[in-house]
Image (cartoon, helix red, strand yellow):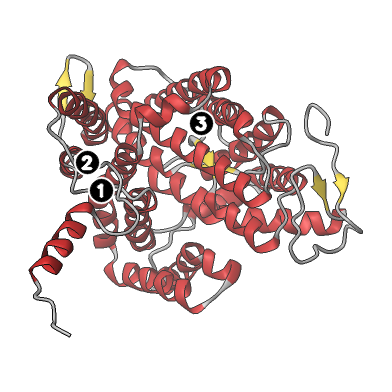
Amino acid sequence: MSMLGTKWKLHGNGKSVRPGEVVAPGERLTWPLTIGVGMQHVVAMFGATFLVPIITGMPPATTLFFSGIGTLLFLVITQGRVPSYLGSSFAFIAPIMASQQQFGVPGALGGVVLAGAGLAVIGAVVQKFGAGWINRLMPPIVTGAIVALIGLNLAPAAKNNFDAAPVTAVITLATIILVSVLFKGILGRLSILVGVVVGYFVAMVRGEVNYAKMDAAAWVGLPHFQTPEFHLGVVGLFVPVVLVLVAENIGHVKSVSAMTGQNLDGVSGRALMADGAATVLAGFGGGSGTTTYAENIGVMAATKVYSTAAYWVAGLFAIILSFSPKFGELIATVPAGVLGGAATMLYGMIGILGVKIWVQNKVNFSNPVNLTTAAVALIIGIADYTWTIGELTFTGIALGSAAALVIYHGMKAIAKARGSVAEPETEQAGLQPAVKAAMNAAAKRTPKKRP
């Protein structure tokens, strides 16, 4: 492949993927098929990418533009080795909404830029020294707690939208739930998008949709760009987002590596730098912060096509769509009831993703360090504790994330010095030692039968 990763070899005859094979990142199918797969990636990212600007009040067309630009930038920086679409990150929802209340949209964009810059710096360090130090700083118990509290911290926002139009919200939520279990393949993975579409039609029937801005918008035009402002007060809101983005990007690289059979550890730092650069660019222009999208991993798993050529198609198509102001305003007409139903599911899913990290890594909650880390961090995040120092305001997400890091490493250091924690940090395969000991003791107490 070229330095830009834009020279793809044709996979086989270019028309099919044989059983047991995959189309590697450096390969492609025929262009008509590649364009078709690229369009699937646009559909897969569509619902989630647009939910973030709709919820936060940011311009949808601008977000779409920078997601497309960011995707192409990501492919260039990773030299075409990591197939990924960069869509709106849900981790930015809470800090953007909180910072808008204090500093408006420009202040929120400043926070997005700072988060992207922080991620890029971490990426440079990872590329130089490897990712081992990240795993030591943020073990699964800490990462899971931070991801969980970010989702659960948003519960009140979901309730407020839900209360605005309960009937529409219930129908939206019910549709999402049913689609996720009634259908297989790509349709089942797009349950949130389908639920939003159904809820939107219900809202139309109930007269809850306002088309005034859409009617006034032009069919073709530039997205609405705006510049950031930088305030010290937003720093505490956006620092935890960087930690989440690190975990998401590293997880994405590992997932693609496992599915393609290629060792991509050497490009993890580039992936972080690329997402950081894309987020900085979005913040300077008025878009939402980006992240690698799990939704598109589902498309790759279903099609067995990991070609980065398909992502070039997806990125370019997203950019083209963003140049229709009328299309952007149409997306912005999604009413509160629909958002409330979708957000109830979406925010809960973010919270459960944190729990999933614990389960997959077999975090042992019999260990008091793990138990205390998760317990305190979650309550601080869910209740949205606040601490103000001068111009700096630290809310539940920032304080909960800090608590997870400080409590885990502090308790672990004390326990190691005192030798006071005997339980392992992860669950061991098979029965726990205490269970085995109890079973052995019971066996000894059972009288043996005489022959």
Tell me which residue sits at (89%, 56%) in the image.
Answer: 12
Which quadrant of the figure contains the N terminus?
top right
Q: Which mark is residue 286?
A: 3
Disc 2 residue type?
Asn
Give the class, few, some or many, for how many residues have Cα within 10 Å of label 2's Cα (few <14, many ≥20). many
Q: Which residue is mark 2?
A: 370
Q: Inspect this view and state whether residue 71 appears.
A: yes
**Disc 2 to disc 1, C-alpha distance:** 7 Å
Which of pointers 3 and 2 lies earlier in the amino acid sequence? 3
Instruction: Give the number of the mark in front: 3 or 1.
Output: 1
Q: Residue furthest front?
A: 451
Q: Tell us which disc is closer to us: 3 or 2.
A: 2
Mark closer to the chain start, 3 or 1: 3
What residue is shown at x 46% (from left), y 41% (from top)? 89
Which of the 4 quarters of the picture holds residue 84? top right
Answer with left or right where residue 211 lies relative to residue 417.
right
Secondary structure state at the residue bearing disc 2: helix
Residue 322 drawn at (x, y percent): 64, 44
How far is disc 3 from disc 1 in space, using C-alphas? 42 Å
Mark 3–mark 1 contact, CB under 8 Å? no
At 34% from the left and 43% from the top, the residue drawn is 147
Q: Would you place residue 28 above or below residue 197 in this image?
A: above
Local SS, label 3 = loop
Q: Is residue 426 above or below residue 30?
A: above
Q: Amino acid at mark 3?
A: Gly
What is the CA distance from the residue labelled 3 to the residue labelled 2? Answer: 39 Å
User: Farthest residue in the right direction?
Assistant: 13
Question: Where residue 290 sits: x, y (%)?
Answer: 52, 37
Q: Position of residue 401 (x, y in %)?
A: 27, 33
Residue 364 - label: 1
For residue 132, the mark is none
